[in-house]
Structures are given as C-alpha cells and as structure tokens.
C-alpha cells in the first residue's frame, strides 16, 4: 500500500494572516502542493479563523483534484455546516478546544462513543469518509470501531517526541495500535509532529498506514528547500524507508 501524503496548509494561511492581504496566496499554495506531488490537502479551520478561514476552505474545495481533508471539532455547528456544504473526501474529527494552540490529545472514544457515533453517521450519510483522531491506546481504538468511523488518525506527538532518544520504544504503541485498528476493520491515518527525520521509520513500522497529514515541519522545511523539493523529499521518506 502506498501511504498518501496530505499537506496541511494551515501554516501558509497563518503567515498570510500575520500581515493581512493575500501573500502568500493560500489558494495558489494548495494548487501548487498538489502540482508538486502532494496526494491531498488538509485544512484545520478553527472557530476564530486565526489560521485557515472558512472562505479559504470553500475556495480550495472548488479547485483541488486530490483528496481534500477537513479537520476540526464537530461540537462547533459552524464546522459541521461547512463540512456538509463542502463535502470533502474526508473529515477528521478532532477534540480541540477553540483557543487551543494546536491539537494535543485524541478523543476519549469510550466516554464519547454515542456522540461520535451520531457525528460519524451525519458525515457518512453525506458520503464523506470519517476519521477520528486518537491516541495509540488499544481500548480507545476498539471503542472507535464501534462509532462507525471509517478510519482513525493516530496522534503521533509522543512518537515524535521520543524518536531521537529511543525509536523502538517510541513506535511500540503505534505498531500495536495499527494492528488493533486493522483487526477492527479501521483504516489508519497519522499526524502531528511528523518530519523528515521520523517519517520513514514510522511508515516502515506501522503497517496499513493509509495517509499522513503533515503541516508544521513540512512548511518550515520549505523555507530552506523550497515547496516543490520539500514535498518530494517527504514523498521519498514515505516510499524509500
Ligand atoms: N493532525 C491533526 C489532527 C492536527 O491537528 C494537526 C495540526 O493541525 C496535524 C495532523 C498536523 O500536525 P503538524 O502541523 O505537526 O504536522
């Protein structure tokens, strides 16, 4: 299986928003990311629109031909309405608070199972693939399977944090989590803090990995290597590990 690289372009919007105006142009960046080899585009609209704006999401939807993935918290009615209007290939449900700097935990799929089941149904009925952001914990993934979601997205912050000290220990929970997901019939995505150093080993060890979504490190690397080179470098890291 070829793992897809979805480029999260929130950081490009953050740079634009820091000055107002339209530089860098977020729409053009989405087009170029896919031209440079991205298999998908990810956006994470937050209620205060401090990164990507709702209007960006609507515009991008009309112009990209690769997979569009919208992440966010379905507790925001505005988010649900946007996703149902845009109908992306995938919605990734993330339990982040409105003002949170970035996502920092997965769902408690045991406690929130009924809610997640209802939300999965809403999006599935609209023909949108559903993915639920989870920590690499067996009971959490087993409970995710009972929500009707198609996939989970493994939250990789702890892997990334421990990769350089002990990568075998850092990956262990993710290998088990992927086996659990596969046994439960769930597809596997992953994201957060993945970079050129840690991506290859993750993709080699986590079997059945369908998609990674990467933003912060990739956009930071693009300052040095350029966007086109950087996307190719991430693609190589995914394929030649
Ligand atoms: N997945 C989710 C659910 C996220 O919230 C983010 C960050 O917005 C990412 C993946 C991408 O993480 P990073 O920007 O560290 O690559």
Image (cartoon, grey):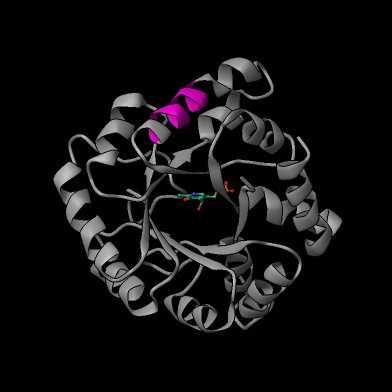
In this orientation, does residue 51 appear?
no
Would you say residue 184 sits in the magenta stretch? no
Compared with 131, 161 (above or below) is: above
Residue 202 on image: x %, y %: 63, 32
Q: Main secondary structure of the magenta part?
A: helix
Q: Could you tell whether 132 is left or right of 89 in the image?
A: left
Q: Could you tell whether 92 is left or right of 213 in the image?
A: left
Q: Residue at x 39, y 28 (%)?
A: 180
Compared with 208, 22 (above or below) is: below
Residue 107 on image: x %, y %: 31, 41
Q: Could you tell whether 31 is left or right of 14 in the image?
A: right
> 13 or 73, which is in the foreground?
73
Residue 228 on image: x %, y %: 80, 63
Q: Which residues are magenta?
A: 173-181
Residue 169 on image: x %, y %: 57, 15
Q: Residue at x 28, y 40 (%)?
A: 145
In this orientation, does residue 131 appear?
yes
């Amino acid at each position: 299986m070829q793992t897809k690289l979805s480029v999260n372009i929130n950081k490009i919007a953050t740079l634009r928003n820091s000055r107002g105006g339209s530089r860098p142009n977020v729409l053009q960046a989405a087009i170029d990311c896919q031209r440079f080899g991205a298999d998908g585009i990810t956006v994470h609209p937050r209620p205060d629109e401090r990164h990507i704006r709702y209007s960006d999401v609507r515009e991008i939807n009309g112009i990209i031909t690769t997979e569009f993935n919208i992440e966010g918290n379905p507790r925001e009615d505005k988010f649900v309405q946007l996703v149902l209007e845009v109908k992306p290939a995938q919605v990734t449900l993330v339990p982040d608070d409105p003002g949170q700097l970035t996502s920092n935990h997965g769902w408690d799929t045991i406690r929130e199972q009924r809610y997640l089941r209802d939300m999965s149904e809403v999006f599935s009925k609209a023909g949108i693939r559903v993915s639920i952001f989870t920590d690499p914990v067996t009971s959490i993934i087993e409970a995710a399977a009972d929500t009707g979601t198609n996939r989970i997205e493994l939250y990789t912050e702890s892997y990334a944090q421990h990769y350089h000290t002990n990568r075998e220990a850092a990956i262990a929970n993710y290998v088990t989590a992927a086996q659990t997901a596969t046994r439960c019939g769930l597809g596997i995505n992953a994201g957060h803090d993945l970079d050129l150093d840690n991506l290859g080993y993750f993709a080699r060890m986590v079997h059945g990995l369908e998609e990674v979504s990467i933003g912060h490190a990739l956009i930071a690397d693009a300052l040095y290597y350029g966007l086109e080179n950087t996307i190719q470098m991430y693609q190589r890291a995914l394929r030649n590990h």
